[in-house]
Image (cartoon, helix red, strand yellow):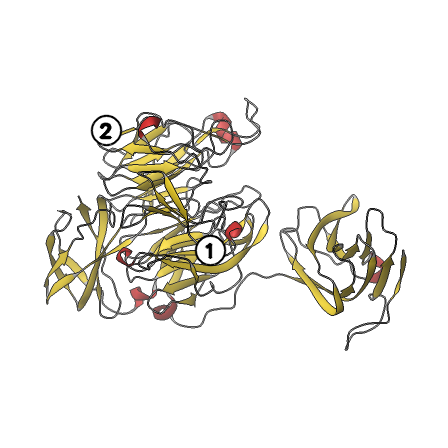
């Protein structure tokens, strides 16, 4: 092995102590590293919790065997930290660049360079390091263009990990143990009901650890809870990982209490619950009571208020992952978008159409970077009648890979549905993307982080399905990542809650986003609406304003960037002036039975405050 200072450098470079070359012959094992030292002035100070963009120009003939390597300095001295990437061979000068992970606590300086672990030559020069700043530039425009953000003075009294809008306009917020092992051991489980209009919180007794349960609003307005946490890593029974629970309860807004029902057939930690056209609930995914991925599919019979036995539920015997993004389509089949929580996506294309009645599945093509859709956002775009869905961003928690900003869209009205690329989400790529359907038929994408519970990316955008484009808006003033949720309120605002970064702290501030439509003049109103309606029924509406359309929106029930039941359903309207009629669709797969928010939209795209209507 030979090493020396290099005089072969790119144009406009300065030859000096930061230009090196290295040759290895008769390689056996190990590696040689061109790492800059304190003496060369290239071991700069760093800030714990920050990330840094590294660059170095190089030539190499070694393939494979050249890596971008980082060392970290603590009070105990220097040590190897990580390899950021493997570099391709290049006969001409090229630039290697990468972003570090979040700097750990205790690290005060880093040094980096290239390492060689194969026969060949390597030349380096032009080392540089810049602190990464995820904050976007200010967005131009008044609130009528970009909306506005407010951070409430009232803070959450609990770690709100599970958020459900109730049919009376309040929110059920559940922590369970709140990802706190000490609270789990102490049996301290928490939930509250929040009234946004008064910022009042009411404590609700919690009978077991609902942390990482599944939840959905039932046809009668109760909230079904299923699964959750049976054991924490390191708790008294000594598991090596979280274990799922079988327990199931419902929450009744009439008495603000949880009521026990029969257990699920199997245990589930991180299950998805998707409501069907008949009002029953499909559930699958998650971790079982042996800390392994469960392949069991479950079905909740709402008429009996109990879970069906295993032999009455068609089984795929396939693992869907944790919190799989499973949406009900208008033909009664289901669509797994490829979104999930933790690690890689499913085998094959990563997205599937699924007939739950026969347990048959078909791969759907076109999803890009399927193993980077961990804690992506998935949502119907436009009215549910259009049968278009979108998946946005994501990352890979297990690999701690930086988040992506890819957007893929699928149209199930096509003869052979397949994902096609949509417009990239503006700004840096990110995981933990919260998506919310708004009553003007746009989609809000807010919050997120570049890496596993770290590197908040404070950007927000509105997607317009008509123009298939994004508009950047001002970001939530509070950075949010893991265990954050966003919920549409009946007044058209959006409440954003939570964040649980890598140090296991929890964000208790509440942000409220007011979309641009709230700054465009007088809102239309719904002055009269029936309290309930049947499929296929024509209903009478009293309205004010130049009303152009009407819609029903399901109350959100979200956790871990997942709400598989969220949708906006168009209501064709007729008439003029203050008296209109609206047509309820006759297909229950479009709007499964239960409470919905009815709003009207005027010709300027301004929605009314919603009124509640029960569909059956």
Residue 252 drawn at (x, y percent): 26, 34
Quadrant location of the N terminus in the rendered image: bottom right
Residue 102 drawn at (x, y percent): 63, 51
Q: Are marks 2 and 1 in contact (CB under 8 Å)?
A: no
Residue tagged by mark 2?
A: 304
Residue tagged by mark 1?
A: 367
Residue 595 drawn at (x, y percent): 22, 45
Residue 209 in the image: above or below residue 89: above
Q: Residue at x 22, y 43 (%)?
A: 594
Residue 199 drawn at (x, y percent): 33, 47
Quadrant location of the C terminus in the rendered image: top left
- Cα–Cα span, label 2 and label 1: 39 Å
Q: Residue at x 72, y 68 (%)?
A: 94
**Could you tell which of marks 2 and 1 lies nearer the N-terminus?**
2
Residue 152 in view, yes or no: no
Q: Residue at x 26, y 65 (%)?
A: 606
Disc 2 crowd rating (10 Å Cα; few below 14, some 14-19, many 20+) is few
Q: Is residue 568 left or right of residue 50?
A: left
Residue 282 in view, yes or no: yes
Query: As rendered, which of 204 and 449 lies closer to the eye?
Result: 449
Query: As rendered, which of 498 and 586 lies closer to the eye?
Result: 586
Disc 1 crowd rating (10 Å Cα; few below 14, some 14-19, many 20+) is many
Count of marks placed on residues: 2
Residue 92 in the image: above or below residue 85: below
The image quadrant of residue 463 is bottom left
Number of the front mark, 2 or 1: 1
Label 1, secondary structure: give it.
Answer: loop
């Amino acid at each position: 092995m030979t090493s020396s200072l290099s005089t072969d450098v790119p144009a406009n470079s300065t030859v000096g102590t930061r230009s090196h070359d290295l040759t290895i012959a008769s390689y056996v094992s190990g590696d040689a590293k061109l790492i800059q030292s304190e003496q060369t002035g290239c071991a700069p100070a760093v800030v714990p919790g920050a990330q840094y963009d590294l660059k170095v120009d190089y030539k190499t003939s070694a393939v494979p065997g050249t890596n971008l390597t980082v060392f970290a300095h603590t009070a105990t001295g220097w040590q190897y930290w990580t390899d950021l990437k493997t570099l391709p061979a290049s006969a001409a000068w090229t630039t290697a660049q990468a972003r570090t992970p979040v700097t750990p606590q205790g690290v005060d300086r880093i040094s980096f360079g290239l390492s060689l672990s194969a026969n060949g030559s390597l030349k380096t020069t032009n080392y540089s390091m810049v602190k990464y700043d995820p904050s976007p530039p200010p967005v131009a425009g008044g609130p009528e263009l970009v909306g506005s953000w407010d951070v409430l003075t009232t803070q959450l009294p609990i770690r709100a990990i599970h958020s459900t809008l109730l049919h009376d306009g309040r929110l059920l917020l559940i922590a369970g143990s709140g990802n706190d092992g000490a609270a789990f051991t102490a049996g301290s489980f928490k939930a509250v009901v929040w009234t946004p209009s008064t910022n009042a919180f009411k404590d609700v007794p919690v009978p077991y650890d609902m942390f990482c349960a599944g939840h959905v609003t039932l046809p009668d307005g109760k909230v079904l809870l299923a699964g959750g946490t049976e054991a924490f890593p390191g708790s008294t029974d000594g598991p090596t990982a979280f274990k799922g629970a079988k327990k199931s309860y419902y929450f009744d807004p009439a008495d603000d209490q949880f009521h026990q029902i029969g257990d699920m057939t199997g245990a589930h930690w991180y299950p998805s619950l998707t409501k069907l056209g008949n009002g029953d609930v499909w559930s699958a995914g998650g971790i079982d009571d042996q800390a392994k991925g469960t392949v069991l599919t479950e079905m909740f019979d709402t008429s009996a208020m109990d879970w069906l036995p295993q032999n009455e539920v068609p089984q795929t015997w396939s693992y869907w992952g944790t919190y799989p993004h499973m949406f009900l389509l208008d033909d009664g089949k289901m669509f797994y978008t490829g979104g999930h929580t933790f690690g890689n996506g499913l085998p094959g294309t990563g997205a599937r159409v699924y007939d739950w009645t026969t347990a048959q599945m078909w791969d759907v093509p076109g999803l890009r970077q399927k193993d980077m859709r961990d804690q992506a956002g998935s949502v119907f775009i436009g009215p549910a009648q259009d049968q278009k869905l979108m998946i946005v961003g994501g990352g890979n928690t297990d690999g701690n890979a930086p988040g992506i900003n890819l957007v893929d869209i699928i149209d199930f009205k096509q003869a052979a549905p397949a994902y096609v690329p949509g417009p990239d989400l503006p700004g840096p790529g990110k995981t933990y993307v919260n998506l919310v359907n708004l009553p003007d038929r746009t989609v809000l994408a807010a919050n997120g982080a570049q890496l596993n519970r770290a590197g908040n990316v404070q950007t927000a955008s509105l997607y317009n399905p008509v123009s298939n484009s994004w508009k950047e808006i001002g970001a939530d003033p509070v950075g949010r990542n893991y265990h954050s949720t966003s919920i549409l309120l009946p007044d058209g605002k959006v409440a954003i809650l939570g964040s649980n970064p890598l140090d296991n702290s929890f964000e208790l501030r509440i942000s409220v986003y007011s979309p641009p439509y709230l700054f465009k003049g007088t809102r239309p109103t719904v002055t009269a609406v029936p309290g309930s309606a049947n499929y296929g029924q024509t209903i009478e509406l009293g309205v004010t304003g130049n009303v152009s359309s009407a819609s029903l929106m399901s109350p959100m029930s979200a956790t871990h960037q997942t709400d598989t039941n969220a949708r906006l359903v168009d209501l064709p309207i007729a008439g003029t002036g203050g008296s209109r009629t609206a047509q309820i669709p006759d297909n229950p797969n479009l709007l499964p039975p239960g409470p919905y928010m009815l709003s009207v939209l005027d010709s300027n795209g301004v929605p009314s405050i919603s009124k509640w209507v029960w569909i059956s």
